[in-house]
Amino acid sequence: MTRRSHAGSHRMGKMGQQQPQQQQPMQSMTRQRGNVSHGAKGLQRSLVASRQCLRRTQCMASSHSRGTVLIRCHLHASSPPSSPSTGSLRSPSSSLLPRGDYLAPSRGVAMSASSSGEGVKESESELSTLCHRLNPSMTVGMTDLASELKRNGMDDMISLSVGEPDFQTPERIANAGVQAILNGHTKYSPNAGLLSLRERIASKLRRENGIGEIVDPAQVVVTNGAKQAIAQTLLALCSEGDEVLVPSPFWVSYPEMAKVAGADAKILNTKIDENFLLTEQTLEASLTEQSKVLILCSPSNPTGSVYSREQYQALAKVVLKHPRLMVISDEIYEHIYYTNADSGADANVCSFASCGVDGIGERTITVNGFSKAFAMTGWRVGYLAAPNKRIASAAAKIQSQLTSGASSMAQLAACEALRDFDSKQDTGVSFASGGGEEVQAMVEEFKRRRDYACQRLGEIGGANMPGMPGKGNKNHSNHSKPDGAFYLFPEVKQWMETKECATSEDLCMKMLREIGVATVPGSAFGQENCIRLSYANSMDNLEKAFEKIQTWLNE
């Protein structure tokens, strides 16, 4: 991976300062530009289709004591306009979408007649109750929408909504997948995964993560991505009436997965000045007899915040007081951790199962995968590691009736990613290895982009980063920079006021429509006044995107 020089500059605005020159990233994915003509009819067709994908959702929240809310979500379907928009379409550089709400005003689709007498639309009456209860993924929707608009001729569209590395899969791993195909490994794999891969995963978790409870590959289930691992774990553990505790802000799929499992998602509020991290006090106050699963994610999507060993230990002690409470530790962003890149030290970072509290490993299901750290999002390989064979077997049984085993050739590529763990000896590699040289080269570039993006937010003003004292303070400290993942999650109340937007969704859609920058509203993650920006994009695109945002806010 090599660097190539690039000079970029920024205009000075009333909210900003001049930005010094920056360099282009080491490596970025090839971005295809759409060849479709920018005609009004073609674009309108894509917008109508996108409205169907991005159906507006609304959560009815009932407040509970001690900073928690129990959410009951009802699907709200967007009503497409009775006739195409009559507004003229401007050039991509001025206005990308017709004026007005991009997501059409929604109306309730209740499971029983509402006060207005409105019920399930006749055209949707054949759909299940569960389907009506589920909300569509806003992150997927915004990413798909940005891609669709770009394919239809909006060549200056820049997406800061995507949640995947923009790097290619390391060559040796890709070659292993190709070789697997050439060698005829194109048949079904064992349901729980190839034994060779499960052995390496178990070895990795013991040697790199220090999780001593994973002593047998039978405790590991290889899945079609980490998302499936979380869903199957919830299905294996939860029954109707159980509570799944989800700290907010949360990855958009956690509450929906709880619904699929028949459980209730109980949202635990966190504070922006505490980096949106769950505290032991909030957890203790939120637990009831129905509490069954706590989901933790570190580094966090959407905030990039990272739990320290001491913070994990405090939470673990609370968990152990409640005999039926289990923990799902989502560690998919495990190696995208910037303190390692800064100092090479890892003494304060760990897996939840190995945080140093006796007995917590027996309560923890660790979920991980290859998508983020190894840039293997399209390969679809994840895994869960359970503290006993009973839980692993239950998750595997569910998988056998849904998808069966993950792709054979993808699993062999994953074996290559974990080639350092083919030894039976549980020594020689530690968490500080950071996934190896290839992963750390990507992390170094992500860190450079993170620093640049935080600097630009400070120059633009009006954005309050988690952990940073003061609203919209331009004097960023180290604590204002996320420690992991590749997201920023600033509070942007001032931006919303400046652009006269009532919600974060309104702000994101207006930004998309008027300047062609795609972001994700904080409401999708349980925090209304925030937005998520992904810096998993080239430095050139980041420069252009922040220049657009600054100019737009200064209009």
Image: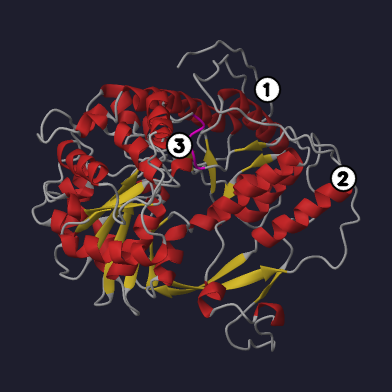
- Please give the name of the residue rendered at 62% of the width and 31% of the height, measured from the top-left corner: 546
Q: Could one spot residue 342 in this view of the protein?
A: yes
Q: Which residue is mark 3?
A: 486
Residue 249, image x, y percentages = 43, 54
Q: Amino acid at mark 1?
A: Met
Q: Which residues are magenta?
A: 163-167
First along the sequence among labels 2 and 1: 1
Taking depth in this image into account, of 269 and 78 the one nearest to the observer is 78
Residue 447, image x, y percentages = 42, 27
As drawn, the label of residue 12 is: 1
- Please give the name of the residue rendered at 64% of the width and 32% of the height, measured from the top-left corner: 545
The overriding secondary structure of the stretch rendered in magenta is loop
As drawn, the label of residue 110 is: none
Q: Quadrant of residue 286?
A: bottom left
382 inside magenta stretch: no
Please rate how many residues cluster around mark 1, counting C-alpha atoms within 10 Å: few if below 14, some from 14 to 19, many from 20.
some
Locate the N terminus by quadrant: top left
Closer to the eye: label 3 or 1: 3
Q: Is residue 82 found left or right of 49 in the rendered image?
A: right
First along the sequence among labels 3 and 1: 1
Q: Whole-Å distance between the Cαs marked 3 and 2?
A: 34 Å
Q: Which residue is mark 2?
A: 89
